[in-house]
Image (cartoon, grey):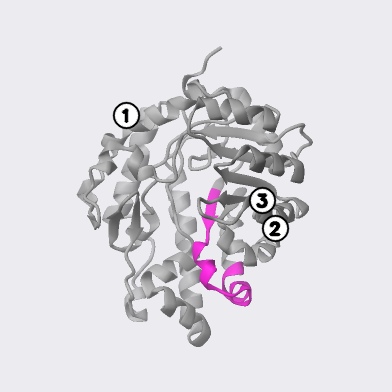
Amino acid sequence: MKYEFGNDPAKVEGYKKFWNRESVKRPLIGFSFKSWFPLDEFKASRAWEKDAPLTLDMVAPEDFLDDQETLLREGETIDDDIFRGACPAQMLMWGDAILGSSMRVLPGNVVAEPMNLSWEEIDKIGFDRNSPWCIKYIEFIDVLVKRSAGKYPITHGMLNGPMDYAVTFRGHEQAVMDLLIDPEHISAFLERMGDFFINITKEAWEHIPLFCGGYYDAQYNLWAPESIARLQEDSVAVMSPDLYGQYLKAVDARISSHFGSAFMHLHATSMMVLDQMLDIPTLHCFEINNDVGGPPVATMIPYFQMVQKAKKSLLIRGSFTSGELRLLMDSLEPTGLYLYIMIADMKEIEILRPIVGF
């Protein structure tokens, strides 16, 4: 039987085994034509003027729907283990906009502009359901839910982490200096941003129905049996491990404790704090990107193995050569492993499929 968007309910069992780290013969496998740059995948966002501000009126949820469903229909031609679903404008970091940051359109991406605010100005920043960007965010979710009509899962949008918000509103250098010379102020701000992350995520899920009895994250096509939250702390790349442990680890632990299937998104630049993150009991899964221009897969193997030795589920996303994929299969246990493989065409899938035992 063919399911629209490839969303066969039987796929739930593979996801459950991934989260529970049950014994399996091969990893959970997903293939996708989606790129690293979602802005270019939608006609609506491609039309935005580059190197220019993104304003509220430029984001019309209905303008994204047809392209969104076209992307999801890859699931009807690709045979793999994953669901396809949608989230509000994946190229936009909604939290920064909701908190009041100016947003700027760049080629392939939208970024929050550094604000360099004083502590007096920062004291006014927090979760506000009535902020224009929050209203737009919830509107986008509601539009997606109505359009999907239960045929594909909907999820919350992209959110940065507490330290990322500190960098946005205080600036890269100043945020690090604050940790060293003004820890009281920045610690309080990080705690408030933890509250913001929890509240905005829970607010979104008040509007989103479950899919096959569970929750979903669209960026990684990840279904979960319990409430899901994708944490990220890209800005830990500018922190020392000691500073992370002293000021941020407890915040991440508190955020993740509010969600039964919380996971952390990481880049290679964050590996120096991986051991501390693995100590957080309420982080059940780690997603690590194989970024374009990043370190060789071989140098990342010890970190992937650290995750598995800690009995956490591991999701690896990226493009891989045949040799890189063989290395992953030879070096890692299939238990609790999900390989999300970005591909260029169907021919590439047929080359890689036998390597992963699919």
Q: Mark 2 — residue? A: 281
Residue 153 rendering spot, x and y as whole percentages: 48, 33
**What type is the residue that disc 2 sits on?**
Pro
**Can you tell which quarter of the image residue 95 is in?**
bottom left
Relative height, residue 2 to residue 351 (above, below):
above
235 part of magenta stretch: yes
Q: Mark 1 — residue? A: 66
Check the image and name the residue furthest to the top: 1
Q: Mark 3 — residue? A: 284
For image coordinates 67% across by 31% down, the residue present is 14
For image coordinates 50% across by 34% down, the residue present is 32
Tell me the SS state at disc 2: loop
Bounds of the magenta span?
Answer: 229-249
Q: Earlier in the sequence, mark 2 or mark 1?
A: 1
Cα–Cα gap, marks 1 and 3:
34 Å
**What type is the residue that disc 1 sits on?**
Asp
